[in-house]
Image (cartoon, grey):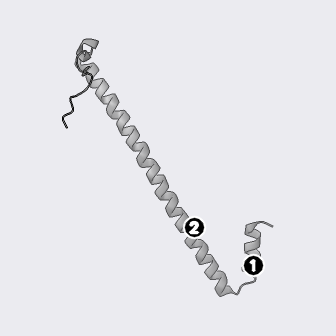
Amino acid sequence: MTVLEKALSKMQKLPTAQQQQVLHFIDFLAFELGDRQVNQESENLNEVQQKTAFWKGLQKFRLTIQNEGVGFTNEDFADLRDRSVGREIIL
């Protein structure tokens, strides 16, 4: 016997007023579950939108760079890195 069959069998033995209470409780559980699902779907959608927004921004930047004719070579980045061993620590 499934859970649904057991619940239906027990519910049929209850007076009408208690059957109505069971129905209200089921409605409450369905509403609560639906609300959680909506919130989870909303969070997932926000995450996807953020990733999509970043990608669109990156593509727009790349297109702007390409349209402006901006180019980078290794010489542009040659002396950006500090090659020293470390900084002097004064205690």
Under mark 2, the amino acid is Ala
Residue at the left extreme, as displayed:
90
In the picture, which quadrant includes the N terminus? bottom right
Q: Are there few (<14), some (14-19), or many (20+) residues within 10 Å of tag 1?
A: few
Q: Which residue is mark 1?
A: 10
Q: For this view, does 13 lie left or right of residue 40?
A: right
Residue 17 in picture, x, y percent from top left: 64, 87
Q: For this view, does 8 lie left or right of residue 50?
A: right
| Circles 1 and 2: CB atoms closer than 8 Å | no
Q: From the viewer's side, name the closer residue of 38 and 90.
A: 90
Residue 34 in picture, x, y percent from top left: 53, 62
- In the displayed structure, 87 sits above or below 21; it is above
In the picture, which quadrant includes the C terminus? top left
Q: Which residue is mark 2?
A: 30
- In the displayed structure, 5 sits above or below 67; it is below
Residue at the right extreme, as displayed:
1
- In the displayed structure, 60 sits above or below 35; it is above
Q: Earlier in the sequence, mark 1 or mark 2?
A: 1
